[in-house]
Amino acid sequence: MKDDTITLDHGSGGKIAHQFTEQMLVPLFDNPMLSQLDDGAVFEVGGWRLAFSTDSHVVDPIFFPGGSIGDLAVNGTVNDVSMCGALPLYLSVGLIIEEGFPMDDLKRVTGDMARAAKTAGVTIVTGDTKVVPKGAADKIFINTAGIGLIPEGVNVGGRMARPGDHVLLSGTLADHGVTVLTQREELGFDLEVASDTAPLNRMVQQMLKVCPDVHVLRDPTRGGLGTTLNEIAGQAGVSIRIHEDRIPIRKAVAGLCEMLGFDPLYLANEGKLIAIVPERHSEAVLDAMRKDPAGGRACCIGEVTDESPGKVFMTTAIGGSRIVDMLTGEQLPRIC
Amino acid sequence: MKDDTITLDHGSGGKIAHQFTEQMLVPLFDNPMLSQLDDGAVFEVGGWRLAFSTDSHVVDPIFFPGGSIGDLAVNGTVNDVSMCGALPLYLSVGLIIEEGFPMDDLKRVTGDMARAAKTAGVTIVTGDTKVVPKGAADKIFINTAGIGLIPEGVNVGGRMARPGDHVLLSGTLADHGVTVLTQREELGFDLEVASDTAPLNRMVQQMLKVCPDVHVLRDPTRGGLGTTLNEIAGQAGVSIRIHEDRIPIRKAVAGLCEMLGFDPLYLANEGKLIAIVPERHSEAVLDAMRKDPAGGRACCIGEVTDESPGKVFMTTAIGGSRIVDMLTGEQLPRIC
């Protein structure tokens, strides 16, 4: 890696991207909200707490089994706002389109956005379209920003994880990452994998109804479960232990990961969440998760401990223990 | 223009871009806020009215006399939120960076963003960085979204223009457009032009203090004054007449426009606003504008009439009258 230019690693979910954000961007734009490093910012307006989040989507290819860049752009921000414990309400959309992009593709992408917004129950209220000359961008990039309202009494954030808490995962890992990967490599045989892109806001609302005391909510997108758990362990100064045999992975996904040499712990998910909750509420929250279409395979995959603050461990299927580190750089560019 | 692909015109400030937004995007994401077609959306949360706006910036070159893509990205959204009559509070930032982009350039751009945010008094609270492989984007694109609070009693919007109102302009036209254009063409002689990029929020606050009854606020960016006035005439169902000899244009800018064959009425401004106000408040609002560093040359350039609803006319310097139409397509791609 050259130090004087931007590399793909700077935009990955990994360690270099985190260092870049924490050492360069956060001090520059210094303020208490940004330095929390949660999925969105939380601020008060007239006694109401609002959550605000943004994501640009640059996925390649733009259409894939299970969805498109349009679904991702809406669900991604709906989910980031939801991970602040908020009820997402309004989205903005910024389109950057390459000259010559087929109108039919644009209709399909924006149609997916409209449908995804309707499904999630959010309203796209403002937007902007820029077209750049051919070659200045690859097809289409979509930024969304979203605003949501945090119910009274809810107070989630990475720093809230406490030893003894349970770590819940809403379903199977790595479906999105493997799907995009196989599309890009054009493996050419019939693979029964599809992106898990889905809105998680209704699930979160049901979870908060049974347990307003949820400590952490996070969607393991870029960088996957491994990176997200490391972020939380660092923010809260706790240790997290997960158990390999409890982590749900589809057979086809596990097989492809093995074949292609990818670790599903680090692949992107676009319709999954991690919840860290007090042990006594764990079962009730899991019940609420399982009632949602995106949470059928929700389970407890581990617990927060104080064994080695900032570190994540995994008890392996054969009973050993290994450190789950944050990846240094990029596994897959343009995954979302 | 081919109908089946996206052209540069779809992202311009002109007629094709408006038709594209009004006929394709607005019906798809249909809701009363989006269909207002103002610079941002206005909604209520717990009795407080918030404004929400977004803009992606793709300007080429990224550095130019008077500013950079970083200044534009912050000031652009600060101004769009301000044009809703709101006090801008919080911004999100989404960076899309090309692999290989020089780290020094990124430091300069983000430094400009931090400085612009400080000058405007807004806080960058959340963000996202994506890096795409070399060739998949041209250098850097920046999306910002912003949230602001609308003071009680303020109610501005394109539809509010009324016959008899005065049309005020905060300063000289076309400085940004001409500056970027000369940079791109590398005309190679010493030109005394610079972008006017500036935050307009403090000016707006002072204007609303002396006249909470301001009817319309709009910043004539892409598409320039001509396009913006046509938008307002269309939204309010009124006619607007401006007077050529009252429109301030710097000598160097006017000379370059003549030499290069561009009409300053359609070139982008990044630190100017149009205000449409009841005649009786016109002088007080102008006084407030002139006290702001960006409003020294503020003046009344015309009036709202009922002569031909939806149309804009200009009384020329030699006393004739001509229609100021909306441009069909793009004068200059990647101007902001």
Image: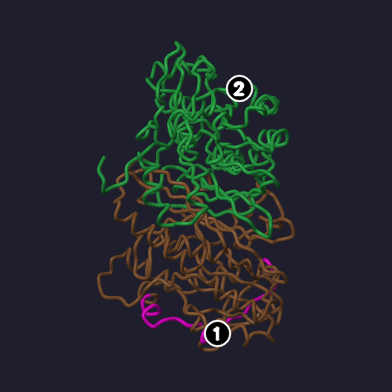
Chain colours: A green, B brown
Q: Residues within 10 Å of mark 1 (few under 14, many from 20)?
A: many
A296 up-or-down from A23: above or below: above
- Label at residue A299: 2
Asked whether residue B190 appears in the rendered view, the answer is yes
Magenta residues span: B235-256
Q: Does the stretch in magenta take in B238?
A: yes
Front one among A70 and A160: A160
Magenta span contains residue A178: no
Q: Is residue B185 left or right of residue B254?
A: left
In the rendered image, residue A268, in percent from the top left (x then y), is placed at: 48, 31
The one of B92 and A301 positioned closer to us in this rendering: A301
Element marked by disc 2: strand
Position in image of residue A335 (x %, y %): 45, 34
User: Mark 1 and mark 2: span between their CA atoms?
Assistant: 66 Å
Can residue B10 be seen here? The reply is no
Which amino acid type corresponds to the residue marked 1 in the rendered image?
Cys
Label 2 marks which chain's residue? A
Which numbered mark, 1 or 2, is in the foreground of this view?
Answer: 2
Whether residue A323 sits left or right of residue A306 in the image: it is left
Specify whether A121 is left or right of A330. right
